[in-house]
Image: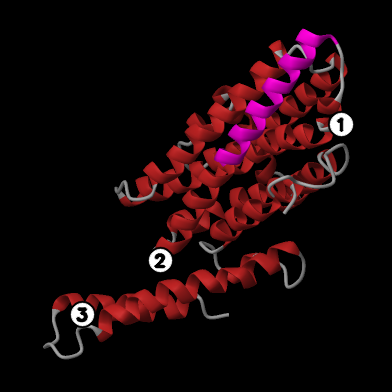
Amino acid sequence: MQARELIELAAVVSAHGPVLIRGSGQLSTNSIDEYWTASKCRLDRWGRSLKSLSDETAGRSRQGRSGRGRSRWPFFRSVIEEILTGEVLTRVWTAVICAYDRHRGTELVEPVVRSVLIGHLEARHRVLTLLVHGPGIDAEQALKLNRLRRRTERWTDMLIGYLAGQYEVTEFAVDPARAKDFAEDLSHQSRLAGGRHVWPLVLGSLRAAFRQGLSPISPNADLNTRIATSIVSCFQPELFDSTGVFRSLWLLRLTNITADTQVMLDELLSLEDHPATEAEDVALRRLTARSRRFDV
């Protein structure tokens, strides 16, 4: 899954996040675990790639020549792009999940997504340090990547602003004041004649903003897909088109559903020789609710 698709998913999450936050269902434990695991694996890969880039640029600077490292720049550039653009989804998903927990007065999932966000921000800091102080990175390339950073930051605040119109989540924006401004603008525009068209126009503009200029291949497409699937698994199927990449992710989420259901079935079967208890009744209700929730 490419970086551009993760940005589009961030827009879907922002648009439909309030439905998830207010919903009565429980988030899939397997999906949250998968989000944390896949995100941590991606952070580890990013860390190794950035260290390799740092070592190579430092070596070329000392030797005063280009060489083998220059041929690897397209890969390193794609890693940096993935970190910068992936931050949009990480921030938006963290905002939704934290609002989900707070709406219920719990702290069940917030620590997980916050941990991922902290790791992502650390990777972002390393990228910015390399762009500013990396002796082997061309000024032109650094300038292009910095423009990408500014673009992703603005769109992050726009998507957070959409959520901020209903929930206090501006802390997850790059610029909280800008996110609040976006929230006010979106709220005002939605009340005008034809306001229902505001959000489709926003999504169209977002797609256009990232349609060109990014590397054609993501270095961690497999982990991006796992992360996206874990997020999609928390939503209802009607939010996704009948075709396209998000529908494919919806089909992949069946794996998570099966795993969660099997765990609950095993728990019930282990108690079949014992009298019914309140805990069993709760487990049965959970299983029934889960089966309805994921009825395609």
N-terminal label among 1 and 2: 2
* 132 displayed left or right of 181: right
Using the image, tell me which numbered label, if any, was put on residue 193: none
In depth, the one of 278 and 38 nearer the eye is 38
N-terminal label among 2 and 3: 2
In depth, the one of 205 and 123 nearer the eye is 123
Q: Main secondary structure of the magenta part?
A: helix
**Magenta region:** 43-64
Residue topped by disc 3 = 280
* 275 displayed left or right of 189: left
In depth, the one of 191 and 76 nearer the eye is 76
Measure the C-alpha gap from mark 1 to mark 2.
50 Å
Amino acid at dot 2 = Gly
Residue topped by disc 2 = 25
The reply to whether the C-beta atoms of the residues labelled 1 and 2 are less than 8 Å apart is no
Q: Nearer the viewer, mark 1 or mark 3?
A: 1
Q: Does 29 appear above or below 292?
A: above
Q: Does 82 appear above or below 19?
A: above
* 241 displayed left or right of 41: right
SS for dot 3: helix
Question: Residue at 24% across / 75% down in the picture?
Answer: 282
Residue topped by disc 1 = 71
Q: Quadrant of residue 68?
A: top right
SS for dot 2: loop
Measure the C-alpha gap from mark 2 to mark 3.
19 Å
Amino acid at dot 1 = Ser
Question: Residue at 87% across / 23% down in the picture?
Answer: 67
